[in-house]
Image: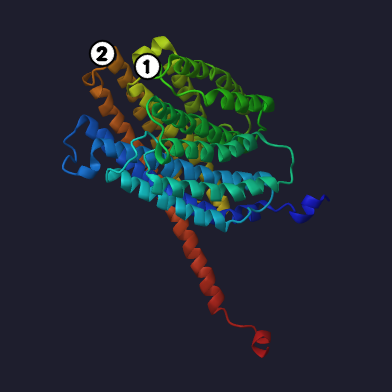
């Protein structure tokens, strides 16, 4: 037995899961609430675009404020805390040790949700910073940064205490994600909010951050989680280990240079470099396709329909389509037609709701029953959620992409895209119904766990003392 095994002996899986219980609940309960809030705001924004008179008397719900609040609620309210919850569990399981300092993420989760609340309220009151995907003012953004660091430190410590020294592919992606977000988020806030740069540099920094958040960070987290759960759910080891390593390095190398449209008012060499890097994303895309395709086919590949594997497979397919759309926007002939249209919105929404959110749903449906020790209260909601979410993403993203094509083909006329936008609102309605089922399942699990905890404490308090205890 090594010294490391003596200090941190291998813990059984139930003990590891129990050590993650409080951080998971603190992060996921709030994330499920913000998911519903963000989807409701997105639905309001979608309706207001083709029906401006809807809620027109409420100054807090103007289109510009609502769409920014909706995007930030989905990204910062749901995607990031839910991702951190899954990363905590995956790192603890891969390390084969109980999670280190579990109360720190619990405190950090409350700080995070407070920061999201302050940020969303500030946006609706008209105090947004004005920078896309970075609308939270200083108060909210500082809280998010502090909370993320507080969660990342004990999670990285769990990685340091691992007994298996060989790294699994998910280690590379998720550890990089823990470092990538605070670096990019702090840099963007320093150069745009705290000590703002002037002129063209502001637009470059803003688009650089948006790309690093929505594409690079989301890809690192989504692929890291997907590569962990694919073999676990299919019963077949992850195939082509070195392809996964190849995907990681090429994604980190090429992905961070993208995101600057060719029609932007920036020096030509910057937009050209961005376009070349975006086209080179075809390299990690091919690697993901190979890993994904070869890892399927195990005994559990067909799975139960609507189970965790269905969410993960849908999410990885969405990543392939989203990356193809991203590459297409970098091609000069296509970008002339589609840039600055609804097509770009379709790509980002597919990355958020079609890729990362779906992978997170599958992971959460697998993790939470193991962490709490009992199954979901309404398991039938899971299958309904899968159906509604998949249908909603299709009816949300495809009409937006077609609206972008119609807009570009008709001299950027908004009238040409209105019918497609009305259809996309229907897709958001399906997504909202699915998200409500997800939130109800999470809240029911949380309340059941609370009730069981109260019953256990009450039984312990009211239990009669043993005779030996009375004599003593």
Q: Say which of 39 and 329 sits in front.
A: 329
Residue 153: x and y, percent?
Answer: 60, 48
Q: Say which of 150 and 234 sits in front.
A: 150
Question: Which residue is the extreme one toward the bottom?
Answer: 471
What is the basis of the colouring in this image? rainbow
Say whether residue 237 is left or right of residue 289. Answer: right
Q: Which residue is mark 1?
A: 263
Q: Residues within 10 Å of mark 1 (few under 14, many from 20)?
A: few
Q: Say which of 98 and 153 sits in front.
A: 153
Separation (CA) of disc 2 from disc 1: 15 Å
Q: Quadrant of residue 467?
A: bottom right
In the rendered image, the vertical position of residue 303 relative to residue 401, given as above or below = below
Q: Secondary structure at mark 1?
A: loop
The answer to whether residue 374 is seen in the rendering is no
Residue 85: x and y, percent?
Answer: 53, 47
Q: Say which of 452 and 144 sits in front.
A: 144
Q: Quadrant of the C terminus?
A: bottom right
Question: Which residue is the extreme one toward the top?
Answer: 333
The answer to whether residue 450 is seen in the rendering is yes
Task: Name the residue at 56% across, 74% down.
Answer: 460
Q: Secondary structure at mark 2?
A: loop
Residue 177: x and y, percent?
Answer: 56, 37
Residue 69: x and y, percent?
Answer: 33, 41
Q: Residues within 10 Å of mark 2 (few under 14, many from 20)?
A: few
Q: Looking at the image, is mark 2 or mark 1 nearer the viewer?
A: 1
Q: Say which mark, if any, is on residue 411.
A: 2
Say whether residue 7 is left or right of residue 186. Answer: right
Q: Quadrant of residue 198?
A: top left
Specify which label sits upstream in the sequence, 2 or 1: 1
In the rendered image, the vertical position of residue 315 relative to residue 95, given as above or below = above
Task: Name the residue at 52% across, 56% down.
Answer: 106
Say whether residue 143 is left or right of residue 128. Answer: right
């Amino acid at each position: 037995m090594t010294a490391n095994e003596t200090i941190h002996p291998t813990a059984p899986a139930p003990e590891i899961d129990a050590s993650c219980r409080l951080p998971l609940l603190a992060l996921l309960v709030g994330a499920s609430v913000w998911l519903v809030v963000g989807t409701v705001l997105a639905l309001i924004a979608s309706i207001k675009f083709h029906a401006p008179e809807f809620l027109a008397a409420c100054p807090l719900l103007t289109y510009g404020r609502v769409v920014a609040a909706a995007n930030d609620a989905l990204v910062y309210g749901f995607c990031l805390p839910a991702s951190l919850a899954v990363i905590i569990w995956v790192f603890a399981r891969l390390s084969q040790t109980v999670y280190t300092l579990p109360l720190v993420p619990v405190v950090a989760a409350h700080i995070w949700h407070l920061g999201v609340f302050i940020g969303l309220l500030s946006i609706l009151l008209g105090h947004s910073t004005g920078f896309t995907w970075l609308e939270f003012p200083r108060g909210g953004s500082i809280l998010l940064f502090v909370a993320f660091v507080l969660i990342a430190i004990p999670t990285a410590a769990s990685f340091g205490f691992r007994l298996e020294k060989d790294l699994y592919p998910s280690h590379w992606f998720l550890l990089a994600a823990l470092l990538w977000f605070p670096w990019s988020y702090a840099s963007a806030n320093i150069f745009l909010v705290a000590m703002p740069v002037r002129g063209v540099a502001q637009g470059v920094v803003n688009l650089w951050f948006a790309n690093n958040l929505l594409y690079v960070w989301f890809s690192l987290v989504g692929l890291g989680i997907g590569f962990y759960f694919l073999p676990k759910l299919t019963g077949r080891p992850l195939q082509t280990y070195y392809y996964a390593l190849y995907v990681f390095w090429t994604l980190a190398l090429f992905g961070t240079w993208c995101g600057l449209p060719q029609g932007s008012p920036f020096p030509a060499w910057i937009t050209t470099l961005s376009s070349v890097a975006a086209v080179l994303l075809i390299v990690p895309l091919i690697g993901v396709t190979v890993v994904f395709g070869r890892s399927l086919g195990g005994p559990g590949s067909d799975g139960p329909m609507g189970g965790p594997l269905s969410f993960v497979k849908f999410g990885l397919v969405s990543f392939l389509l989203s990356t193809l759309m991203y590459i297409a926007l970098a091609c000069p002939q296509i970008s002339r037609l589609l840039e600055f249209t609804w097509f770009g919105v379709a790509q980002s929404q597919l990355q958020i709701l079609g890729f990362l959110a779906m992978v997170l749903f599958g992971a959460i449906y697998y993790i939470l029953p193991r962490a709490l020790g009992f199954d979901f209260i309404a398991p039938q909601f899971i299958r309904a959620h899968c159906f509604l979410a998949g249908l909603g993403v299709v009816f949300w993203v495809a009409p937006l992409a077609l609206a972008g094509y119609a807009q570009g083909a008709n001299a950027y006329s908004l009238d040409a895209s209105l019918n497609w936008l009305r259809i996309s609102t229907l897709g958001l309605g399906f997504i909202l119904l699915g998200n409500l089922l997800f939130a109800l399942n999470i809240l029911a699990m949380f309340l059941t766990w609370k009730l069981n905890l109260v019953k256990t404490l009450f039984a312990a308090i009211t239990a009669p003392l043993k005779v030996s205890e009375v004599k003593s």
